[in-house]
Image: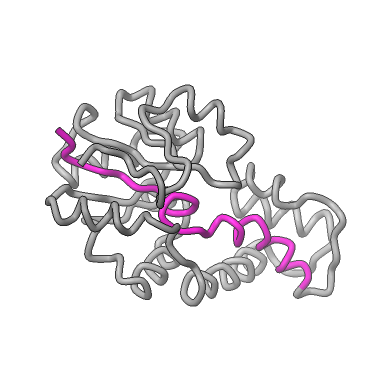
Amino acid sequence: MVKGLIFDVDGTILDSMSIWMNAGEHYLNSLGIEIDYDLASIMFEQTMLETAQYLRERHGIEQSDKEIIDGINAMVYTFYARDAMPKEGVLDFIKEAYRKGIPMTVATATDKPMIEAAFRRLGLHKYFKKIYTASEVGSGKDKPEIFYRAMRAMGSDTKTTYLLDDAFYSLNTAHNEGIGTIGVYDFSAECDTEKIKSIVDIYIEDWSKNKPDIL
């Protein structure tokens, strides 16, 4: 019996990965800098501090690392506050889980103010017991601590919890801990689709067409 659901946000609940893939380029454009290389793939593997250092050194930007991070975050925050929308069909699943009294939490690498801005606008706050972020926990989803905190909040354990996520590294961490795993397709992780399918218990191609039958 399912006693807890841990949700990733970007690419799982919200159709929001595009902002992260383009944020660095948009920031450089705001400074009058045009680029002809794939910055998104570089940023995907870096922390925000590493990205700031990379941009400053490669493009000779005068701003400090903090100013660069703040500039990128301001653009991203605006997207969450005004534009980010749920993936089609996901709210039906969340509402059904809520109606059945199944506790839900969030585990995300995105900073909490951005998630909260989107959740307030979309009315999603009431469905989740708590939002856990990698920065607050002190480690990312490549380590299990964030999932164990979420389970403690829900009163569930590895045998009664599912993680819903679009990223292989996160799902792999949960899989290795014995947590149930539900992979969610997102274009940003398309290159990892087969790896994800090889480790998850359930795979969702499209929330509007194949919701997991676990509730």
Q: Is residue 60 left or right of residue 166?
A: right
- In what quadrant of the picture does the C terminus appear? top left
Q: Is residue 211 above or below residue 35?
A: above
Residue found at x 37% / y 32%: 202
Q: Nearer the viewer, residue 125 or 149?
A: 125
User: Where is residue 130 drawn, in percent x and y?
Assistant: 25, 56
Q: Is residue 55 left or right of residue 74?
A: right
Residue found at x 18% / y 55%: 98
Residue found at x 65% / y 55%: 21
User: Where is residue 132 drawn, in percent x and y?
Assistant: 33, 51
Q: How many marks?
A: 0
Tell me where residue 176 sits by quadrant: top left
Q: Is residue 61 above or below residue 187?
A: below
User: Where is residue 172 drawn, in percent x and y?
Assistant: 45, 28
For the record, the magenta segment spans: 1-29
User: Where is residue 45 drawn, in percent x and y?
Assistant: 64, 42
Q: Is residue 73 left or right of residue 43?
A: left
Q: Is residue 101 left or right of residue 147?
A: left
Tell me where residue 210 sits by quadrant: top left
Question: Can residue 88 be seen here?
Answer: yes
Q: Is residue 180 above or below residue 120?
A: above
- In what quadrant of the picture does the N terminus appear? top left
Tell me where residue 2 sits by quadrant: top left
